[in-house]
Amino acid sequence: MNAMKQSVLAVSRTTGRFTSAGRILPSFLIVGAQRCGTTSLYRALAQHPLLLKPVLHKGVHYFDVDHARGMSWYQGHFPLKVGAALLARKHGHRPLAFESSPYYLFHPLAGERIARDLPEVKLIVLVRDPVERACSAHAHELARGFETESHFEYAVELEDKRLAGAEELLRSRPEAVHHSHRHHAYLARGRYAEQLDRLEPLFGQERILVIDSHRFFHTPERIYDRVLEFLEVPRLGNPVFERHNGRPLPKPVAESLRQTLRDHFEVYDQQLVRWLGGDPSWRQ
């Protein structure tokens, strides 16, 4: 990020903090999973006149890595109440603010923090074939410089060692950031059912919408309408659906490894049936 952009962001954040009391808080969050189409859904929803994205950027990351900054800092990222009131009068429906931070689903404290600070919020979770997600995540972290192991197979072998003690550390030191937990959890992040089981007691299944991202990309209009129904927002206009943040794999993944990982995820994929209302697309 260049110096000018950093300066603009700093001024915007300062202004937001000073005016936080006059800003709305989000009514729903896209909480994950990483590399499952969260950016594509976020940009489709942001085209709706009643769905208001953060003023500065897609993901605020307050409930995972920046919680120590406080609620006024967080609220300062969202649109002003006066603007929301004008939209409500224009469209006859209350606007909803939202953000998308895909680490929220995996961070061990994020769910508890969200439930405490936003007690009425709804959550949206996207899931995809966890083997494909793991491969995509490795390519993504490698390209961003957060991964040093260029071989996906070796990165997977290192995962248990890299993540050992990470959850305990994050729970015992709430302000801590664990690099590997955030950037190297290739298999752990794909065990979606474990993460949903952690959220369910806090929010109830009725306030969590789980979307199969393959179905979103295959039939975006249908999934978009389902999201609006979940949010209780009328459809206004026709969004343009585009796929964002796609990244090719640096090297092919051996079919033997893919099969080993498919076997690993089978039991977790079966546990998604009650969230998706049927088998995941990659198991059909």
Image: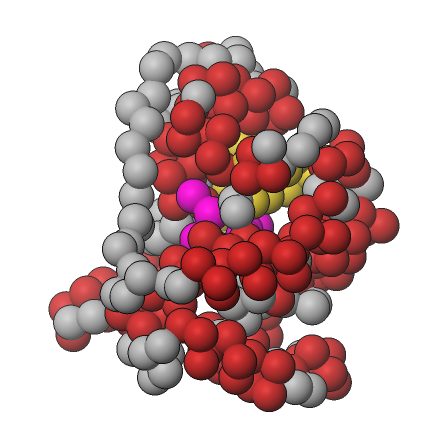
**Which residue is located at x 68 percent, y 51 percent?**
266
* Above or below for 23 versus 273: below
Q: Is residue 170 magenta?
A: no
Q: Taking 141 as reference, is 191 left or right?
A: right
Q: Taking 227 as reference, is 253 left or right?
A: left
Is residue 47 in view?
yes
Residue 126 occupies which quadrant of the picture? top right
Q: How far across and down, in percent of the image, does residue 114 sit?
A: 68, 55
Q: Taking 268 as reference, is 22 left or right?
A: left
Is residue 65 in view?
no
Q: How far across and down, in percent of the image, does residue 83 sit?
A: 41, 31
Name the foreground residue: 241 vs 58: 241
Q: Taking 231 as reference, is 183 left or right?
A: left
Q: Is residue 34 magenta?
A: yes
* Above or below for 189 versus 52: below
Q: How many marks?
A: 0
Residue 206 occupies which quadrant of the picture? top right
Magenta segment range?
31-37
**Which residue is located at x 41 percent, y 26 percent?**
218
**Which residue is located at x 31 percent, y 38 percent?**
243
The residue sitting at the front extreme is 256
Q: How far across and down, in percent of the image, does residue 143 sit?
A: 27, 69
